[in-house]
Image (spheres, helix red, strand yellow):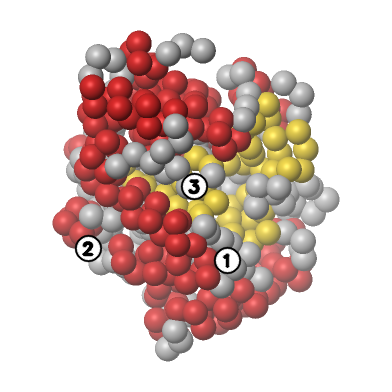
Amino acid sequence: MKNPEDYTSDPGLKKIIRQIRLGRRITREEGVLLYEKAGLSLLSLLADTARRKFNGNKVFFNRNFHIEPTNICVHNCRFCSYHKPEGDPESWEYSHEDMLEMVRKFDGKEVTEVHITGGVHPNHDINYYGGLLQKIKQVRPAIHIKAYSAVELDRMIEQSGMTTGQGLLQLKGCGLDSIPGGGAEIFDETIRKKICPEKSTAERWLEIHETAHQLGIPSNATMLYGHIENYSHRIDHMLRLRELQDRTGGFNAFIPLKFRKANNPMSDLGETTMPEDLKNYAVSRIFLDNIPHIKAYWPMIGREVAQMSLLFGADDLDGTIEDSTRIYSMAGSREQNPAMSTGEICRLIRDAGFVPVERDSFYNFIHTFAL
């Protein structure tokens, strides 16, 4: 094993290396220093050390598909390529029966999870969304339903007149098993006012996830990076997640989401480079020392970068997807029809030197494949 201290003469980085070797938490300032001064070789070594403490040489995936009920949304975030106003020829709004037919397409197939998230529709309430969960469980009782971002939940619960806890308990009773991490964007209030001023606040996002965790509903967390934020904003975002995880332990995974420039008002900003993407995965793995999994969402960054991210701290490639999401293809991702077979996913993982593990939504092992 190479000595990480051979890769730097910076005393601050050497101190961080010693902290990581001893399993000690790094500070906000040290997180920023990693972003600013650590090279990719050093970051890869440190992130690999951190990931192996959690997951050894294993990389996870599941068999899943998405349902995106609508892209009609009351919000108009500047980074979003997905939102369309009602009546736009590119807008859609699926009925319950439409979405149940999507579920039935997987009859006889070994999918274990459906991921449901979309626009914040102006006219759909908590009973509409809860009813959808109940119908899906009737069609496929054993499937895990990961549904509704905190931003969607915020509106439907507020409109219902319920407390956050009451609304989440109603949805849990209808079949909600976990919550995706969308809508977090960047927590810094100044940045948030510039890129998504209408959206739920950072405090509200965190409150919804904390309440869900207290009610036994686990969730994921995300961060949108590569737009107008800086390294301090990223670390602040992750620090708030780390502090919440200290209190609840309810986050399964953290998912860095790369800003994609196509078809949105922020397209003039361009996009981050691949080295920057890899740096971001590494710092995320090192800083978030209490979140067990870092997910490389391959429909967003592409298969090749997702594979490389496994050498920079990521240990989860999401799932098979089955060409069921349009959020990132509409924003210009190279993966225009995202679908991978289990064989293709296993090949990506093996070629990076790791052991593929098919998981359920709680990261219980379903099948470990040979290296």
The span from disc 3 to disc 2 (Cα, nearest Å) is 28 Å
The residue at which mark 2 appears reads as: 197
Task: State left or right for residue 343 relative to residue 333.
Answer: right
Q: Which of marks 3 and 1 is in front?
A: 3
Q: In percent of the image, x 68 and y 26: which residue is there?
A: 355
279 or 183: nearer the viewer = 279
Q: Can residue 312 be seen in this view?
A: yes
Callout 3 touching callout 2 (CB < 8 Å): no
Residue 77 picture quarter: bottom left
Q: Mark 3 points at which residue?
A: 291
* Residue 2, x across and y down, in percent: 46, 11
Residue type at numbered disc 1: Ile
41 left or right of 166?
Answer: left
Marks 3/1: CA distance?
A: 16 Å
Q: Residues within 10 Å of mark 3 (few under 14, many from 20)?
A: many
Q: Which mark is residue 217?
A: 1
**Rendering quarter of residue 341:** top right
